[in-house]
Image: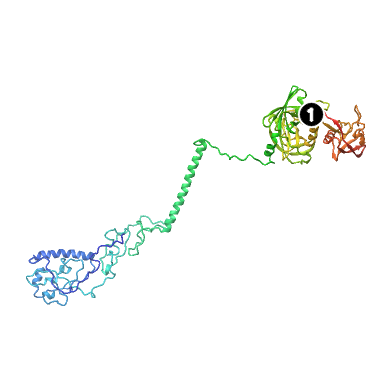
């Protein structure tokens, strides 16, 4: 509404200050000049009076009662005639009334903004200036100034900004469309009543309350008060938001913008990712890879064991007598002796050929030093090869069930194959061979059982402990077809592998290297291999004597028909088991046997004898 802009002062705002001496009554200069036509003056006064009255009615601050109309006294008839027959006579007011022309004139106080040339309302009705000497043109009388203490005072203090009366708009802005304030007199002046309000049209329908909006929006100008302290208003009349409200709105907009940005970013990222996944990217494919690590491994790990043992392991290719075979062996000493299984080199027999291939790829010819079918062991030797690394030998008597082991060999001619497992059992009596039918090629082994995968081609290879020491020589497996000979078929491992204990293999290898033949410990009795009872029974029939005269058994008191049930406290269930337990010892070792004879049981002690192996 531009309340702060002061308006130009209007003449109705307040009374103009009166200079000293204005209250004296005196003639007013003839506005028409000397010799002017009275009719023109009258007309001029009439027009001025009409304009002045209009101004008074619309904008004047004061309205004073007019002087009472009386009959003109004698001597002023000419003045009355000159003003007009219908002009009433106005009685002079003031102390000089009736004292003549100079002393009988009076003035009414003019508003401050009225020019001197304007004609007062009193002249329109009948002015005392009409009573002038004959022959002088009538002039407008100046109203007398009242003393300041006698003048009416406004009801309100003067407004320094010249604000228009309440309910009326300023000259620069339209009135509010819905404001109808009661008219208040400005400065104590009564104002003419306004036109009566128009009757409201009858409502078409009864007003129905709208339950969903219990708080209707207020009209913009309903509570408008122009005299109230200026406040922040928008053009629609609503209050301007405070700083806290603006901050909250900005924070809400920021959060909504962040959420929208996240949603858009997620959608774009998902679309790009799906495109790249379907189309294989936009460039060459680069796959992530781990950095190169140090080659060293713990010495007791499978990798550490293999790293130390592989240089001592060899692969044997044997040809002869129309047969060919592949097996494994390991270096015993620096002189070129290599230990392997008898059934590996058996095809070479006489006139065959044995080729030894080392882990590094070097090959050399080898010859048989000695072999024994009863133990299924053989020693071959290579010549002219330097830098040999002998394999360390362990102690099979120290092995416990559950110890981790590693097997190295060439299954199906795949050299340097490493597998691992544990010791599943000890002193497992097994027999292998027997293809000749006379039993001369049958081997009896008090074996170590392992679940390390062993396949054809592993025969003669080392079974290692966690220190890379040999604890057994891999010799046989139990396959699905029921065979135990590694060379008898191509059946694979089912987790039942058997190895000759290294303690027995060491003794046999020494004898083969030193003498070319191995000795077998014997009791000096003939066993009944057809006996189906529990234990090993000494034979009663045969081409020879059941008990060798002067042998270890005869000296211990063993007789034909005796059933041996224990060897050194271990149960024996068959003749094969008795042979295995016996061959686990050296010739000259002392044994304690438990016998069952005729329902009685007895224990005997004997010293093992020696027999040459084949």
Given residues 498 and 248, the one toward you in this image is 498
* Image coords of residue 40 (percent x, y): 10, 64
528 to the left or right of 306: right
Indicate the quadrant where residue 444 lies.
top right
Q: Residue at x 74, y 41 (%)?
A: 403
Nearer to me, 106 or 488: 488
Q: Quadrant of residue 317?
A: top right
Residue at point 13% right, 75% down? 104
Q: Is residue 211 visible?
A: no
Q: Is residue 239 left or right of residue 356?
A: left
Along the line of sight, the residue nearer the viewer: 596 or 405: 405
| Residue shown at 51% from the left, 40% from the top | 273
- Which of the image's four quarters has the N terminus? bottom left
Q: Quadrant of residue 562?
A: top right
- Residue 106 in the image: x percent, y percent? 15, 73
Q: Is residue 434 visible?
A: yes
Q: Give the structural element (helix, strand or loop) at label 1.
A: strand
Colour convention of the picture? rainbow
| Quadrant occupied by the C terminus | top right
Query: At which x and y percent is residue 263?
Result: 48, 46
- Residue 595 in the image, given as x and y percentages of width and height: 90, 38
Give the side of residue 175 with respect to residue 544, left or right.
Answer: left
Horizontal relation, residue 24 to residue 558: left or right: left
Decide: few, some or many residues near mark 1? Use Cα within 10 Å; few <14, some 14-19, many ≥20.
many
Q: Which residue is mark 1?
A: 370
């Amino acid at each position: 509404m531009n309340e702060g802009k002061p308006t130009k002062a209007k003449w109705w705002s307040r009374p103009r200050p009166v200079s000293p001496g204005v209250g004296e009554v005196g003639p007013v200069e003839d506005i028409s000049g000397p010799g002017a036509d009275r009719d023109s003056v009258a007309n001029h006064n009439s027009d001025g009076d009409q304009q002045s009255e209009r101004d008074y009615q619309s904008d004047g601050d004061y309205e004073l009662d007019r002087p009472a109309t009386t009959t003109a006294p004698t001597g002023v008839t000419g003045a009355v005639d000159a003003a007009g027959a219908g002009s009433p006579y106005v009685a002079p007011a003031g102390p000089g009334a009736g004292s003549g022309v100079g002393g009988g004139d009076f003035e009414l106080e003019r508003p401050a903004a009225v020019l001197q040339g304007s004609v007062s309302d009193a002249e329109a009705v009948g002015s005392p200036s009409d009573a002038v000497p004959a022959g002088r043109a009538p002039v407008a009388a100046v109203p007398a100034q009242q003393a300041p203490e006698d003048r009416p005072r406004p009801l309100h203090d003067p407004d320094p900004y010249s604000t228009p009366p309440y309910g009326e708009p300023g000259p620069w802005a339209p009135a509010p469309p819905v404001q109808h304030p009661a008219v208040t007199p400005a400065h104590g002046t009564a104002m003419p009543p306004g036109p009566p309000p128009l009757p409201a049209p009858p409502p078409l329908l009864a007003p129905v309350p709208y339950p969903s909006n219990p708080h209707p929006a207020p009209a913009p100008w309903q509570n408008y008060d122009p005299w109230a302290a200026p406040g922040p208003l928008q053009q629609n009349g609503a209050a301007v938001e405070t700083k806290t409200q603006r901050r909250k709105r900005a924070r809400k907009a920021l959060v909504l913008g962040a959420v929208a940005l996240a949603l858009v970013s997620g959608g774009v990222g998902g679309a790009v990712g799906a495109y790249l996944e379907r189309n294989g990217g936009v460039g060459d494919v680069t796959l992530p890879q781990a950095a190169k690590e140090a080659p060293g491994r713990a010495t007791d790990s499978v990798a550490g064991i293999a790293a130390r043992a592989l240089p001592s392991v060899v692969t044997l290719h044997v040809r002869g007598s129309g047969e060919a075979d592949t097996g494994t062996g390991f270096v015993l000493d620096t002189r070129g002796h290599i230990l392997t299984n008898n059934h590996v080199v058996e095809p070479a027999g006489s006139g065959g050929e044995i080729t030894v291939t080392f882990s590094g790829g070097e090959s050399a010819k080898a010859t048989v030093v000695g072999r024994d079918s009863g133990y299924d062991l053989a020693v071959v030797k290579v010549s002219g090869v330097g830098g040999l690394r002998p394999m360390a030998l362990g102690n099979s008597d120290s092995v416990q069930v559950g110890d981790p082991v590693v097997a190295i060999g060439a299954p199906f001619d795949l050299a340097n194959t490493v597998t691992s497992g544990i010791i599943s059992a000890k002193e497992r009596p097994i027999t292998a061979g027997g293809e000749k039918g006379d039993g001369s090629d049958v081997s009896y082994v008090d074996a170590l059982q392992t679940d390390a995968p062993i396949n054809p081609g592993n025969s003669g290879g080392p079974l290692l402990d966690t220190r890379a020491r040999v604890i057994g020589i891999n010799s046989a497996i139990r396959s699905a077809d029921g065979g135990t000979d590694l060379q008898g078929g191509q059946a694979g491992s089912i987790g039942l592998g058997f190895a000759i204990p290294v303690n027995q293999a060491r003794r046999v290898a020494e004898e083969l290297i030193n003498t070319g033949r191995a000795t077998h410990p014997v009791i000096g009795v003939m066993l009944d291999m057809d006996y189906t009872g529990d234990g090993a029974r000494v034979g009663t029939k045969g081409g020879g004597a059941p008990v060798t005269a002067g042998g270890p058994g005869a000296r211990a008191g063993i007789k034909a028909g005796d059933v041996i049930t224990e060897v050194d406290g271990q149960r024996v269930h068959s003749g094969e088991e008795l042979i295995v337990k016996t061959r686990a010892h050296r010739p000259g070792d002392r044994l304690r046997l438990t016998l069952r004879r005729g329902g009685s049981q007895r224990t005997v002690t004997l010293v093992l004898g020696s027999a040459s192996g084949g």
